[in-house]
Amino acid sequence: MPRPQLSSEQAARKAIADRLGELRRDAGLTATALAQLCGWSTSKASRIERNLTRPSDTDIHAWCRACDAQTEVADLIAASRTADSMYREWRRVHRDGLKRRQRDDVPLYQRTRHTRVYVSNVVPGLLQTQPYAEALMSAIADFEDVCNDASEAAAARVERSRVLYDGSRRFAFLFEEDVLHHPWGGAEVMTGQLDAILAAMSLPNVSIGIIPRGTPRTMWTLEGFLIFGAEEVQVETLSADLAISRPSEISTYLRAFERLAGMAVYGPGARRLILSARPHSG
């Protein structure tokens, strides 16, 4: 019989247990020897490695210390703490409508000093106008077959965007030029949306970069992601939102963002691309 598919949370837990087992074997320790070094029973060490017992932060510290692998502690603890919430299926998140999600993320935006955003398909949420957001969210609700509260959700998204006007926080937006040409809500809505992006470019704490079509690539097109300081990365796939907090993975996304930023144009170059995409530009 085929093995049952693990849930995302179970898979994350198994990955942690597997990594702990690798560290033990790399250190040349038996399960009994590791347990003795940690001051545990052999059965506890075995249950942790077989993913039958969830290790505490203290357990992870002790395991890594016994294996002389203290550099692994931060990643393993971060992975353990976020395993329950790292994978959020959109249909479950949106089952009561899209409005709540807009409000749920407000504290994360408010406590982050430097937010980086990359998108390849739609205007970044913090830059969206209410008509654009409403047209987009209505399509999302229809596709996911959930409660369509697009009007209320769009208003909440615009309200969330007030954080842009807090000069103590910095925002860096990167998006592909194609984003400017994907019409949501018709010509009038798109004209208003592009004008709003132009207005946001004047904010001293906001950087907007656009990757032109035909630019030689040093980084391939990715699914949208948001980097909240050094705390968390959110990756938005078609079916789910992934919350990543492992320091090594956050570093990977920071490196990708820097490569994408190197391909983008800013200031006058970005402004020209936006103006050329305006439906009423003549």
Image (cartoon, rainbow, N blue to C red):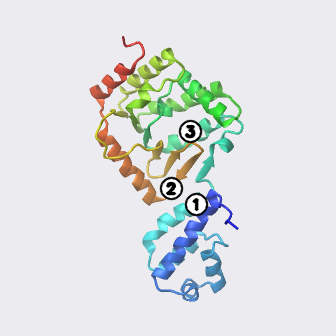
The percent coordinates of residue 164 (x first, y second) are: 45, 32
Q: Earlier in the sequence, mark 3 or mark 1?
A: 1
* 211 relative position to 163: left or right: left
Q: Which residue is mark 1?
A: 81
Residue located at (40% from left, 18% from top):
278
Tell me the SS state at disc 1: helix
Residue located at (37% from left, 28% from top):
203
Is label 2 or label 3 in front? 2
Tell me the SS state at disc 3: helix
- In the rendered view, would you say 110 is above or below 180? below
Q: Which residue is mark 3?
A: 106
Q: Earlier in the sequence, mark 2 or mark 3?
A: 3
Crowd around label 1: few <14 · some 14–19 · many ≥20 (10 Å)? some
The residue lying toward the viewer, choosing from 209 and 106, is: 209
Distance from disc 2 to disc 1, alpha carbons, whole Å, reads: 9 Å
The percent coordinates of residue 269 (x first, y second) are: 28, 27
Q: Which residue is mark 2?
A: 245
Whether residue 242 appears in this view of the structure is yes
Tell me the SS state at disc 2: loop
Q: Are marks 2 and 1 in contact (CB under 8 Å)?
A: yes
The percent coordinates of residue 91 (x first, y second) are: 67, 42
Residue at the far top: name it. Answer: 282
Q: Quadrant of residue 266?
A: top left
The residue lying toward the viewer, choosing from 68 and 14, is: 14
The percent coordinates of residue 125 (x first, y second) are: 51, 33
Name the amino acid, label 3: Val
Distance from disc 3 to disc 1, alpha carbons, whole Å, reads: 21 Å
The N terminus lies in which quarter of the figure?
Answer: bottom right
